[in-house]
Amino acid sequence: MLWLKAFHVIFVVTWFAGLFYLPRLFVYHASATDAIGRERFRLMERRLFALMSIGAVLAIGLSIAMLLREPAYLGPGWMHIKLALVALLAGYHLWCRRLMRNLGSGLRPRSQGWYRWFNEVPGVLLIAIVILAVVRPNFS
């Protein structure tokens, strides 16, 4: 079980690295004015999205493996909240894909300021998820 946890943490870090950096690339992409710059950001975003998707799939897969191995982990209320936040994070991940495709096709429906705020979402989710996983508050 410790090996599963170790690799789970490694892939969570990989996933979050991408979730922190991809929206920052969106800020720069939205402000790019030349075709070469926009193409550079499009390529960087696609490559980063592929890597962070691998991290996401492996992090989620390893968490499922841990839950299957120790179903008692599903008992506490903090775990239910944590899993709900991870589901939100997965939704954010998919939203990033949509934004990336829009920017890549030349659509710019959002301002760079909007992308700056969008970039803060994974940080807030990370704080909440880590607090739940480490503190394990009792909600009874």
Image (cartoon, rainbow, N blue to C red):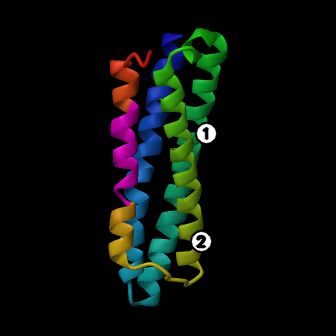
Pick the quarter of the image with the N terminus.
top right
| Residue toward you, 4 or 66 | 66
Say which residue appears at 37% left-offset and 72% top-offset.
114
The picture places residue 134, in percent across and down from the top left corner, at: 35, 21
Q: Is residue 128 magenta?
A: yes
Decide: few, some or many residues near mark 1? Use Cα within 10 Å; few <14, some 14-19, many ≥20. Answer: some
Q: Is residue 56 visible?
A: yes
Position of 31 relative to 96 (above/below): below
The kind of secondary structure the magenta stretch mainly shows is helix
**Circle number at residue 57:** 1
| Residue toward you, 26 or 132 | 132
Q: Which residues are magenta?
A: 119-129
Q: CA distance from mark 1 to mark 2?
A: 20 Å
Number of numbered discs visible in the structure rendering: 2
| Residue toward you, 75 or 104 | 75
Relative placement, left or right, of 98 versus 17 is right
Q: Is residue 70 visible?
A: no
**Circle number at residue 121:** none
Residue type beneath disc 2: Arg
Position of 21 relative to 16 (above/below): below
User: The residue tagged with tag 1: helix, strand or loop?
Assistant: helix
